[in-house]
Amino acid sequence: MGKIRDWFSYLSHFVYAEKLESMDQILQQIPQQLINGVTVGGVYALIAIGYTMVYGILFMLNFAHGEVYMIGGFTGWWVLHLLTNSSGGLLLNGFIVIILMILFAMALTGALGMGIERFAYRPLRNAPRMNLLLSALGVTIVLRNLVLNLQGAKIRFFHTSALIPKSIQVFHIGGTVISFMRLLVIGVSIGLMAILTWFVKETKMGKAMRATAQDTEAATFMGIDVNRIILLTFLIGSALGGAAGALVGLLFTQVDYYVGYVAGLKGFTAAVLGGIGSIPGAMVGGFILGIVESLATTLISSTYKDVVSFIILILVLLIRPWGILGEKAPEKV
Amino acid sequence: MRILELIDVDVFYGKIQALEDIQVHIEEKELVCLLGGNASGKSTTLKTILGVVKPARGRVEFMGDKISGLPTGKIVQRGVSIVPENRRIFPRLTVLENLELGAYLRNDPRGISQDMERVFNLFPRIKERLKQYGATLSGGEQQMLAMGRALMSRPKLLLMDEPSMGLAPVLVENSFEIIQRVNREGVTIFVVEQNANMALSIADRGYVLQLGKIVLHDKAENLLNNEMMKKAYLATG
């Protein structure tokens, strides 16, 4: 232990030179950062699921997914805005407002995802992969600029202070601070993932989805309507991405038209880390990425948070491109 | 009653003609085989029946209705089921889930569980492996599962694409015995095969396909004694 302490304090002098935080301070922060990591990790996992589900069936990277997340954030903001009166009071009970924000964000982004599939990807189903990728980039540009036109380039703030009673806004456990919103994000993201896991494992549609991902042609032989399954995949993946957008809005209280870019990259990194194509992989990858990022914030510096994520992405691609839970693609002879 | 009929069917892949003027008919409860070497057009014939490939000319009729032009799902819904080439078991679904998906279009839980029992009677080995992933089964077991899965839709016509392929000789014999048994239970079967001896030993009639054309069509016992068949396909000298 002594040795590790020495090493840490050496490290902390190195990277924290300007702050000169002591080892004890850093250690105290670790539970706090774990909580933060699980919160952000839940969000990354929700975004990553959208990438991984679409990849699992279509073998394409839906680059527009980050923008879907951003629109989820704006939808949440819009619902909150509509339900707030001019003096800052709420028209409905705060918890109901929160539920409506998440549900509307999911409904709108789910429909948006299906529309993207139907009009931007399906016509290119049999075209070379590159065309599909370009179409995805095109959708990204269109969505981002659409929001820029409708909302302007300014940051929209979520006025969340009235949503929940003061008495439960923050909890103290030992030296660790947990806000209600963090618990909400953790709870909702884990809850949604549990529902998804049940759906994919137990329902007829879920089984048809897995079958389609494993062997599309054999799935059609079973009478499965593959087009419907693909639409359903986009509906679920996009709705989860939209929920992530609304949750982040509630947590960090702001959204702008550009947030989809970094969020999309993080979700993609989490999906690759967990093993692209694997839903449990996306969940694991999301949480690991969130926790590693948060710890890096404490141990190194928040400036390098994103760098850490992308170093992880590069390392995974170099060392274990099929990720933690993914399967090595079989060599087709 | 006539279950299936292919009338004047031409199929092209781009500019290359794969099938030319195909005439095939299958009556209820028959076991008919389609024989031919590599690239003779056997699989294309099955793909045409299933609507995976569309004929450039001619038509496919199923129980008197035209089905060529319909999407595969609709054709499956009418009662056509296939044991595909290489079996195509869903590797990361359990054996039970594979069977359940065979009944994907059905909504009669009682009938489904009856048919599940029927499959277990035919293939007791499958029942022992319900919780395992499809990929963990041996080749022979996968063949049984593929057949069980196809039967779960309670098909009026069962298509089989090269059931002997990739199986050890003992298993091939076993597999054909099962095909015969299923046929005797009342399922109409159309089997595509390279192993002409095996197929003709259980079939009622056979068609022989060569370079996309049907060159012979006769009762199975006549084909077994046909001089050209003996030379080209039966290897009995």
Image (spheres, rainbow, N blue to C red):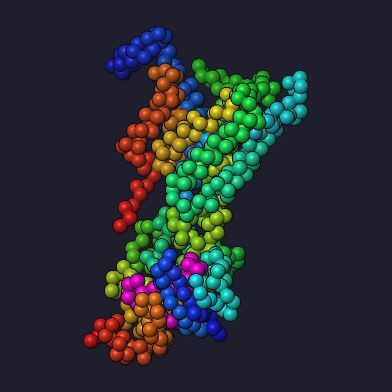
Q: What count of labels does the image hold? A: 0
- Quarter of the image for the N terminus of chain B: give it: bottom right
Residue at far left of view = B237
Q: Residue A12: x percent and y percent?
A: 36, 13
- Quarter of the image for the C terminus of chain B: give it: bottom left
Q: Nearer the viewer, residue A221 or B215?
A: B215
Q: Nearer the viewer, residue A276 or B130?
A: A276
A13 part of magenta stretch:
no
Q: Looking at the image, is A17 positioned above or below residue A60?
A: above
Q: Residue A91: x percent and y percent?
A: 76, 28
Q: Looking at the image, is A314 positioned above or below residue B90?
A: above
Q: Looking at the image, is A212 positioned above or below residue B173?
A: above
B47 part of magenta stretch:
yes
Query: Which residue is drawn at the image coordinates 53% and 48% (left, top)?
Result: A121
Q: Is residue B219 left or right of residue A226?
A: left
Q: Residue A154: x percent and y percent?
A: 62, 23
Q: Which residues are magenta?
A: B31-54
Residue at far front of view = B15
Query: Which residue is drawn at the image coordinates 47% and 82% (left, top)?
Result: B23
The answer to whether residue B110 is seen in the rendering is yes
